[in-house]
Image (cartoon, rainbow, N blue to C red):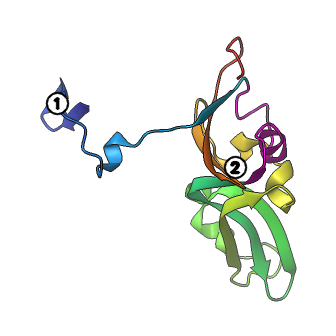
């Protein structure tokens, strides 16, 4: 475990015994390695590489769309943390808009054709894919790495 303190600055490495109920000791198994960065692969392409994949499960919210009662629906497809407060106002009629947020994207979803980076997935991420038989973890690799 790496412990970082910013005030005062210190960096320490600590070794501890595994505690099976501790989230810091979560294991990512079984894992699949994909030789692609988030800029190179869509949700649908990722799901097609995993046998019996049902959906990508994210650990953050994605703003799927804004709904304006007067103007209708505007598709967005961006990580919620990247949204500015002023975007909650419709640019056409200036009315407040309602967000639709998701954390799970299925193969047939309208967001499945989005590149992972446009949804806010950083490089070298470990992603959760729900399959018909359970959860599989997928690690995105950089170019030059192997795919299993």
Q: In the rendered image of this protein, does residue 40 appear above or below residue 147? A: below
Image coordinates of residue 41 in percent, x first then y, are 79, 35
Nearer to the camera, 15 or 18: 18
Q: Secondary structure at mark 1?
A: strand
> In the figure, residue 106 lies in which quadrant?
bottom right
Measured in 3D between alpha carbons, the distance from the residue under mark 1 to the one under mark 2, in whole angstroms, is 33 Å
Q: Residues within 10 Å of mark 2 (few under 14, many from 20)?
A: many
In the rendered image, residue 15, in percent from the top left (x then y), is placed at 19, 27
Residue sitting at 69 percent across and 15 percent down?
Answer: 146
Say which of 8 and 128 sits in front: 128
Residue at mark 1:
9
In the image, residue 49 lies in the stretch drawn in magenta: yes
Q: Which mark is residue 41?
A: none
Q: Give above or below for 123 relative to 53.
A: above
Q: Earlier in the sequence, mark 1 or mark 2?
A: 1
- Left/right of residue 146 with respect to residue 68 in the rendered view: left
Relative depth, front residue between 113 and 86: 113
- Quadrant of res 49: top right
The verdict on residue 86 being magenta is no
Q: Residue furthest top?
A: 144
Q: Secondary structure at mark 2?
A: helix
Q: Which residues are magenta?
A: 36-54
Expressed as whole percent of the image width and height from the top left, the position of residue 69 reads 80, 88
Residue 55 falls in which quadrant of the image? bottom right
Figure quadrant of the N terminus: top left
Quadrant placement of the C terminus: top right
Checking the image for residue 119, the label placed there is: 2
Q: Depth check: give the residue in front, 15 or 9.
A: 15
Toward the left, the furthest residue is: 8
């Amino acid at each position: 475990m790496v412990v970082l303190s910013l005030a005062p600055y210190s960096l320490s490495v600590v070794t501890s015994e595994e505690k099976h109920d501790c989230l810091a000791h979560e294991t990512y198994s079984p894992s699949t390695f994909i030789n692609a960065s988030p800029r190179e692969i869509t949700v649908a392409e990722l799901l097609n590489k995993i046998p019996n994949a049902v959906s990508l499960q994210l650990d953050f919210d994605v703003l799927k769309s804004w709904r304006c009662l007067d103007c209708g629906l505007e598709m967005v497809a961006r990580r919620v943390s990247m949204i500015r407060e002023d975007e909650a106002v419709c640019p056409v009629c200036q009315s407040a808009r309602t967000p639709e947020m998701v954390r799970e994207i299925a193969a047939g979803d309208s967001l499945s054709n989005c590149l992972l980076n446009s949804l806010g997935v950083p490089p070298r991420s470990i992603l959760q894919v729900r399959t018909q038989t359970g959860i599989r973890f997928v690690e995105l690799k950089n170019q030059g790495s192997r795919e299993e």
